[in-house]
Image (tube, grey):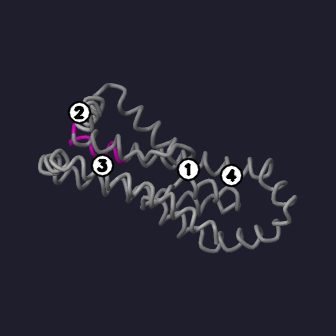
Amino acid sequence: MLRRLYDRTMSLAAHRHAKLALAAIAFAESSFFPIPPDVMLIPMVLAERAKAWFFASLSTIASVIGGFAGYLIGFYLFDLIGKPLLEIYGYSGAFDSFAARYNVYGAWIVFIAGITPFPYKVITIASGVTALDPLIFGLSSVAARGIRFFFICGLLYWLGPPIRRFIEKYLGLLAIIFVVMLFAGFALVKVVFAQ
């Protein structure tokens, strides 16, 4: 089943609407969608290595725009829903302290979340909730997402056929590692925001 899914993804990667799908996934993952764009990006680069830098640029731009959508979700919906709930439960003072600490390290928080498997959407929304300076948010997002996507595309570009053979040989193991990392990222979110 996994092999059929892989083969299907590889054929979709060469589809004429693949670029639009990649941009949509990169945008959505930065604001609300749980699956990272890597699942589309990697097969696309493997299918068309000559376009690796274009795919990296497209992913970066769409992801940063999606990050600002997440920021706006946090900024506007927090005032509408979150703030009244904090006031009801008497946590508005604690939140103000959290927001101040978050904004002191905001550039680093956004940067680290942007290059790791940590769910980036959580950070984009939290940045809006705490009203992190949009310029700092934008610069950190561009740097982090650019490094992540250009690194992935660069590896695939330079290693090309050998990396494709490696992926195809160890597909099951790589899928397990990907799922574990995805769940570990969400678990890390719980730990970080529980403190």
Taking 172 as reference, is 91 above or below it?
below
| Circle 1 Cα neighbour tier, 10 Å, few/some/many (<14 / 14–19 / ≥20) | many
3 or 4: mark nearer the eye: 3
Q: What is the number of the mark on residue 175?
A: 3
First along the sequence among labels 4 and 1:
1
Q: CA distance from mark 3 to mark 4?
A: 32 Å
- Secondary element type, mark 2: helix
Please report the residue visible at 76 percent of the width from the left and 67 percent of the height from the top: 95
On-image quarter of the N terminus: top left
Q: CA distance from mark 3 to mark 2?
A: 14 Å
First along the sequence among labels 2 and 4:
2
Can you identify the residue that label 4 sits on? 74
On-image quarter of the C terminus: bottom right
3 or 1: mark nearer the eye: 3
- Secondary element type, mark 1: helix
4 or 1: mark nearer the eye: 4
First along the sequence among labels 3 and 1:
1
What percent of the width, then of the height, locates residue 71? 63, 52
Q: What is the number of the mark on residue 67?
A: 1
Taking 24 as reference, is 156 above or below it?
below
Can you identify the residue that label 2 sits on? 7
Disc 3 marks which amino acid?
Ala
2 or 4: mark nearer the eye: 2
First along the sequence among labels 3 and 4:
4
Pick whichever, 43 or 69, lies toward us: 43
Asked if residue 195 lies left or right of residue 178, the reply is right
Q: CA distance from mark 4 to mark 1?
A: 11 Å
Q: Which residues are magenta?
A: 47-56
Q: CA distance from mark 1 to mark 2?
A: 30 Å
| Circle 2 Cα neighbour tier, 10 Å, few/some/many (<14 / 14–19 / ≥20) | some
What percent of the width, then of the height, locates residue 81? 79, 49
